[in-house]
Amino acid sequence: MTDVQRSTNPMLERDLFKIGYFAYGHDSASTMSVAPERWRARWDDIERLAREADEGGLDFLLTLARWKGWRKGHGQNWNFDNLTTAAALATITKRIALISTLHTPVIHPVMAAKMLATIDHASHGRAGVNIVAGWNKNDFEMFGLKVSDHDQRYKQGEEWLHILKRIIAGTEDEFDYDSPNFPNLKGLMGLPGSIQQPGPVTINAAISDQGKDFAIRNVDYILLGSFDEKGVSTEYRDDIHERSRRLGRKDPPQLLAMLAPYIRESRKEAEDFYRYFAIENEDTETLDNYVGLRTKHATTGGDGTDNSLRRGAAAGGRAVVGTPEDFVDTLVRLKKQGYAGATMTPPNFLEDLPIIVNRVLPLMKEAGLR
């Protein structure tokens, strides 16, 4: 068993409002834009981004699992593997958490446990995993898999996580596991265990009632794409806390919001760029394919008529358009609503990093968020 060093991961600092980058591992990130300024995800840029985000004070880098783009010629066809990306970045960074999104039907839990433990050692305790069942039919067909129904996804995911956690804790005591989802697994064990104990930081996006209960039973953070923009309602936090009480969890999962910052020194400049990038240069064909597939298979798919789904797809999350002060005001409201942090998917990670580091982080400190 390795020494306990969970404190090395900034995601475990309870008094810190965490901010970090999301979906940096593939061309265009989460945007559906054809603007030439969009993120291109070339490796040298990813490496530079990791160094500068780490030195600048961001708390995490979170990948989005992507195997295939939404149409031929679309940027998201250019994408890097999550786990090997985290491993490569572990040795060139010092503080920032490296969180990998994993599809539970695609990546076997025995392999995932071994690879995550390796990343945790290489990073000295900064690994994390975002657990997703997946809904992208195009991705799954590359592996000869079908997208399961909603209830089956969570059952399979819970078993996957149970196996992974037991292995990654670090044990020579072998155990067997047999279920319809993971049949006839024999002699499971794993050394070294992860540095973080009982395992790396865990995240899950939970919207449905079943999803919320899954997250409460299993993870440290819940990732959300929507919130009360007026900063008044604590309904979601209260629901999570009440469910945690009923399920016997004393320390409820923390909440992370998903944001797409379009930050400039003036509101007009920010609004003009947002209009240019996300509206005038909208990749309509890709966006139509994304919304159509998500509507059929995702928990949050809706009926395809929700304009917020289109805006979210175009902007890479809930768009926040304005000055650094406007962005920090949003973070303050999120904090009051019970959120512990936020992911950020800007139009271009490297080009937008200086205003985050030089303007947003100092304002967050002034506001009591850091």
Image (cartoon, rainbow, N blue to C red):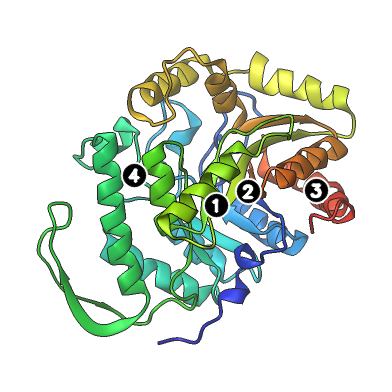
Q: From the image, tell me which residue sits under label 4.
A: 133
Image location (x, y in percent) of residue 141: 24, 35
Which mark is in front, 3 or 4? Answer: 4
Label placed on residue 354: 3
Crowd class of label 2 (few under 14; some 14 to 19; many from 20; radius 10 Å) = many
Q: From the image, tell me which residue sits under label 1.
A: 62
Image location (x, y in percent) of residue 121: 48, 77
Name the quarter where the C terminus is drawn. Answer: bottom right
Q: Are marks 1 and 2 in contact (CB under 8 Å)?
A: yes
Position above or below: 290 against 262: above
Which of disc 2 and disc 1 is earlier in sequence?
2
Crowd class of label 4 (few under 14; some 14 to 19; many from 20; radius 10 Å) = many
Q: From the image, tell me which residue sits under label 2.
A: 21
87 to the left or right of 9: left
Alpha carbon separation for disc pair 4 and 2: 21 Å
361 to the left or right of 141: right
Image location (x, y in percent) of residue 113: 34, 67
Q: Secondary structure at mark 3?
A: helix
Crowd class of label 1 (few under 14; some 14 to 19; many from 20; radius 10 Å) = many
Q: Secondary structure at mark 4?
A: loop
Instruction: Choose between 185 and 116: the one closer to the eye.
Output: 185
Which of disc 1 and disc 4 is earlier in sequence?
1
At horizontal 67% and vertical 59% (from top left) the residue drawn is 59
Q: Amino acid at mark 1?
A: Leu
